[in-house]
Structure formats: C-alpha cells, structure tokens
Image (spheres, rainbow, N blue to C red):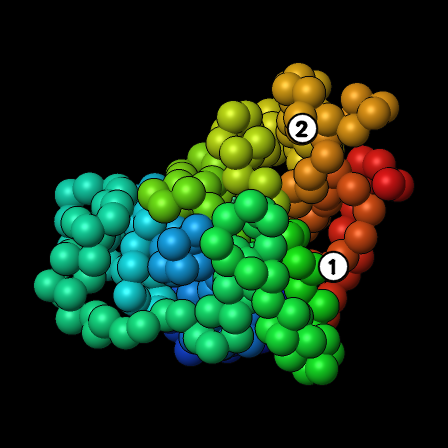
Amino acid sequence: MAVSSGNGLRAVEKAVALMREGKDVVEAAVEGVAIVELDPNDMSVGYGGLPNENGVVELDACVMHGPTMRAGAVGALQNIKTPGRVARAVMQHTDHVMLVGAGALAFAKAVGFEESNLLTEASRKAWMNWKSRLSKDDDWLDDDEIAKDFAAKGGDLPTTKRPTGTITCLCLNAKRELGGCTSTSGLAYKVPGRVGDSPIIGAGLYVDGDVGAAGSTGRGEANIQVGGTRVIVENMKRGLPPLDAIMNVLKRVCDQTRTERLLKSKGKPNFNLTYYALRKDGAVAAASIYKGGTYAVNDGETNKHIELAYLFEN
Ligand code: ASP
C-alpha cells in the first residue's frame, strides 16, 4: 500500500503498481512522487514550483529505505525537475546523506540528470505578481494585468499570499518493507538558500523498517523544531496507534510555538502542519493542526482520498 498527501493520488496508484511489479519501496515512492514533480500544474513541487524571492526555483527532497535504514537528500537544488530521484541517487551512489545547492546540482549532473529551466510561465507570473505588490514605495508597479490573467484562468493566487505545498509518499510492500520520499519547492518566494523540513531526515520524512514511516507537509520551520516524523515513528515504536502518534506531535508543535508573530489571538499557531503515518502492519493515519483537506491512500484495492483528522476546527 501507499499513503501520500492530497496531491498524491496519482503517486500512490503508481507506487503500488511498481511494488506489484517487484520494484523496491523507495523506487516506488520516488517514481510516484516524480509524476507530481514533472507536472507543471502543481506549483508546489518540482518543475513549475514557485520560485524563491529572486525568481529561481530551489527544490528540496529526501528518501529513506526501511530495510537498510539508508537515506539520501538534496536541499536548494536548482535546474533538475525530479529532486526525489536525485535524493535517491545520493543514497545509492555516495557515502553521504545530504547534498545542497551547487554541490547537489554538480552531483546530479555527474550521475546523468539533465538541467532545465524549472520556472514555468505561470510560476514566473505568480512571482512577478507577488514582487510587484510587495511595497508601494519600491520601483515595481502593481501589476494588475497579471492578477487579471490568473483570475481569467480560474486561478486565485492572492496577491501577497505565499502558498506552500509538498508531496510525501510512504510505501509498504507485501514483504512488509517500508520506504518513503518527500519532495517540495518549499515556501514560495523564500529567502534564497532557505531549506525547509522536506529534505531533513526526521522532519520531512522518517522510516524505521521495524516500525513504520511518517512524512509531513506544511510549515517546515515548525516541523524542523520538533523533529516531527522521527518522534511520530518513536511514538509508534512505544505502542501508540498512528493517529495518537501524530496528535502527540501536533500538540507539541502548538505548545512549542511561542513566538508572537506565529500565534493567533487565542494563542494557537497561525500556520498549518500535516503529518502522515504508515505502520508496518498497514495501519494508516494523517492529521493536521487545523481542519480541512484530504490525503491519498492506495490500499492495494482502492485509490482514494480520505479526510484529514485535525486538532482544531479552525
Ligand atoms: N514543508 C514545506 C516547506 O516548509 C512546505 C509545505 O509543505 O507547504 O518547505
């Protein structure tokens, strides 16, 4: 079976099909994720992802393989459409776990990945729209044409909102082997070089081949600060069911969010974070701080979206 974020319905279907063919769990997760990475219409992952504040797309991804407990990751990788595959190559071809920036790109080219421009016309326009509205006092005039263009196409990228989004995919095969991949273009319009939780083992993804796997989407900074997926897997190891294992960490995130600019008036976080967990026996759960959204599951028979559990209504 395979479990993914809401944008991963095609990913879980592909991952299960590959596992049925006998492909390794990490390969299944990576190739499922690659469908979304290569989709220019998903503006939060891979090709077509929203860029950093300079208009450059920087991607983060990682993989982890339960049977061997090996892992690979890339951070702030430019010009390669499928960072999940590069993360897998880091695991396979190096003695390292994580490569970043120029080194990650040089490595990707060395092992045969092709460079390309990751900024689609839609992502470039979204970035220009954000940039043009940053301040009334700078030299960029508000670009109403771009906003109209988006609205005409049914898109509603609000003017200064900074969308986030990520895909995580957790796989369990018939031999009860576990593996996973998480991939993202990160926070839109981020400071160049900013690396979120997605490529960090123990934050964006953690897999313990004897216990289970967990992945995450949402505000990466909050997740890094609790090492969320690592704690979820440890919680499952000491007997908590997957949903309780997640809820425990979501509560921790809320308790540990103490900076005023990150809090709503009632003291709750003003951001969302979602965790996905898959136990070795096939038990599954996913939950967010705030209500809303779905996750994708293929249990070997059906391919479906399921509503996310949550801590707070709103
Ligand atoms: N977790 C991602 C990051 O912080 C973003 C997201 O999932 O929305 O880079």
In the image, residue 168 sits, relative to residue 250, either above or below, namely: below
Q: Which residue is mark 2?
A: 262
Left or right for 43, reference 207: right
Residue 217, percent from left and from top? 58, 48
At mark 2, the secondary structure is helix
Q: Nearer the viewer, residue 116 or 5?
A: 116
Of labels 1 and 2, the one closer to you = 2
Q: Which residue is mark 1?
A: 294
Q: Residues within 10 Å of mark 2 (few under 14, many from 20)?
A: some
Q: Nearer the viewer, residue 189 or 14?
A: 189
Picture residue at 68% right of the left edge, 20% below the top: 260
Quarter of the image for residue 301 reads bottom right
Picture residue at 34% right of the left edge, 43% below the top: 193
Residue 309, percent from left and from top? 79, 46
Q: Nearer the viewer, residue 250 or 28?
A: 250
Left or right for 106, reference 238: left
Mark 1 or mark 2: name the one nearer the start of the chain: 2
> Is residue 306 something that shows in the picture?
yes
